[in-house]
C-alpha cells in the first residue's frame, strides 16, 4: 500500500488597520484600564463599541464608560488551549455583558473547570500587567463574588487620552496538515519523476492539470491519467512588486498562468530567465528543475515563436 502523503501548511496574513475615533478610544481606554462603550440613538450601550448603529446605520460617537464587572450570558469550555490563545491552561470562552452595557463582549474566563462556570455567574476583568492598547490588555475574566448593583447611567467619556492608539496589526494564521487525495497524490508523485500528469474527463474529454479527481464542468469522476507538457504557453500573468515573507525571490518577478501542452486547465508558476517586463501572453515556456526538488522551481522561455492567441484563448 503506498504511503499517504501529507505536509504541514501555514496560511498567515497579518495586516495593519487604521482606527477611527471610536475604536481608537476603546483600545486606548483598555490600556488605561478603562472600558468604553458607545451609545446608540435609542439609548443602548454597545460594548465593544462600533462606529455605526447596526440597526439604523447611524454614525455613533457618544462614548460612555462601563464597569469592569459583568455577567456571563453564555459560555463554552476549551479543554485544550492552542498556541497564542489568551491562556495556556484550560479555560472557558464567555460572552460577558458588562455592567452598564446592553451587549456582550467575547473573551475568556479563567476557571478551575467546566463545573465552575455557569450562565449568569458574576465575573470581573483581570488586567494584563503590560498593556499596549489591544483587546489582550484584558488578560481574561475571573469569577467575582459581588452582586450586580442597581443599574446606573453609564458616565459619558470624552474619549481623550494621552498618546492614543491609532492603528493595530491584526495577525491571522491557520496551521493545518494537508493530505492530498488519490488524484493529487499521483500528480505529486509524477512531479518527483519530473513528469506532469493530469486526468481526462470521460464525458467532455478535457484534461485537467493539476487533477482534481472529478471534472469541474461535468461533475463526473476522472481516473484516466494523461501525461502533458512539459512545455506550455503563458496565458496571463501579473508582476509581483511586494516581497513575500520567507520567500527568497527578489522583486519584481512574474507569476503566470501556464497552459501546458495537452492540458485544458492552466496552472500557475513563476517565470524566470527573462526580464519581468518582457514576459507576455503567448510566451512559450518550459520547466526548470533544481537538484533534489520535487517540483519545478520556475518556467523559462523555450525560444520558440509565441503561440497564436486562438490556440490558448479558452484558457485565459
Image (cartoon, grey):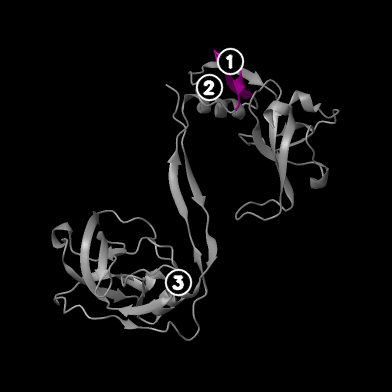
**Viewer can see residue 100:** yes
Q: Percent from the top left, x then y, of residue 123?
A: 21, 71
- What is the residue that sits farthest to the bottom in this orientation? 162
Labels 1 & 2 near each other (Cβ < 8 A): yes
Q: Residue 45 or 168: which is nearer the viewer?
A: 45
Residue 204, disc = 1
Which is more foreground, mark 3 or mark 2? 3
Q: Residue 216 or 222: which is nearer the viewer?
A: 216
Check if residue 109 falls in the magenta segment.
no
Q: Residue 259 or 161: which is nearer the viewer?
A: 161
Res 228 quadrant in image: top right
Q: Residue 311 or 229: which is nearer the viewer?
A: 311
For the point 45% across and 28% down, which residue is it? 3
For the point 56% across and 17% down, which residue is it? 201
Q: Of marks 1 and 2, which one's residue comes earlier in the chain?
A: 1
Query: Residue under circle 3?
Result: 23
Q: Percent from the top left, x then y, of residue 128?
A: 35, 75
In the picture shown, does residue 293 fall above or below 103?
Answer: above
Amino acid at each position: 500500500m503506498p504511503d499517504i502523503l501529507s505536509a504541514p501548511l501555514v496560511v498567515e496574513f497579518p495586516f495593519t488597520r487604521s482606527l477611527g475615533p471610536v475604536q481608537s478610544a476603546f483600545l486606548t481606554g483598555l490600556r488605561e484600564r478603562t472600558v468604553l462603550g458607545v451609545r446608540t440613538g435609542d439609548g443602548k450601550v454597545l460594548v465593544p463599541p462600533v462606529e455605526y448603529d447596526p440597526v439604523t446605520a447611524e454614525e455613533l460617537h457618544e462614548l460612555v464608560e462601563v464597569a469592569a464587572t459583568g455577567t456571563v450570558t453564555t459560555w463554552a469550555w476549551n479543554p485544550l488551549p492552542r498556541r497564542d490563545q489568551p491562556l495556556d491552561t484550560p479555560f472557558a470562552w464567555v460572552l460577558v455583558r458588562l455592567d452598564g452595557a446592553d451587549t456582550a463582549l467575547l473573551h475568556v474566563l479563567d476557571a478551575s473547570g467546566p463545573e465552575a462556570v455557569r450562565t449568569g455567574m458574576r465575573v470581573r476583568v483581570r488586567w494584563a500587567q503590560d498593556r499596549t492598547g489591544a483587546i489582550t490588555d484584558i488578560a481574561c475574566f475571573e469569577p467575582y463574588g459581588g452582586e450586580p448593583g442597581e443599574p446606573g447611567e453609564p458616565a459619558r467619556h470624552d474619549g481623550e487620552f494621552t498618546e492614543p492608539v491609532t492603528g493595530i496589526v491584526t495577525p491571522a494564521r491557520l496551521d493545518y496538515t494537508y493530505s492530498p487525495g488519490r488524484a493529487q497524490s499521483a500528480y505529486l508523485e509524477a512531479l518527483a519523476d519530473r513528469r506532469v500528469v493530469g486526468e481526462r474527463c470521460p464525458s467532455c474529454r478535457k484534461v485537467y492539470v493539476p487533477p482534481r479527481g472529478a471534472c469541474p464542468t461535468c461533475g463526473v469522476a476522472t481516473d484516466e491519467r494523461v501525461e502533458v507538457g512539459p512545455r506550455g504557453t503563458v496565458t496571463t500573468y501579473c508582476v509581483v512588486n511586494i516581497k513575500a515573507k520567507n520567500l527568497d525571490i527578489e522583486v519584481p518577478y512574474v507569476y503566470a498562468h501556464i497552459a501546458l501542452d495537452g492540458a485544458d486547465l492552466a496552472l500557475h508558476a513563476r517565470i524566470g530567465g527573462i526580464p519581468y517586463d518582457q514576459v507576455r501572453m503567448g510566451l512559450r515556456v518550459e520547466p526548470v528543475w533544481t537538484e533534489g526538488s520535487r517540483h519545478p522551481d520556475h518556467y523559462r522561455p523555450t525560444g520558440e515563436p509565441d503561440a497564436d492567441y486562438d490556440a490558448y484563448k479558452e484558457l485565459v
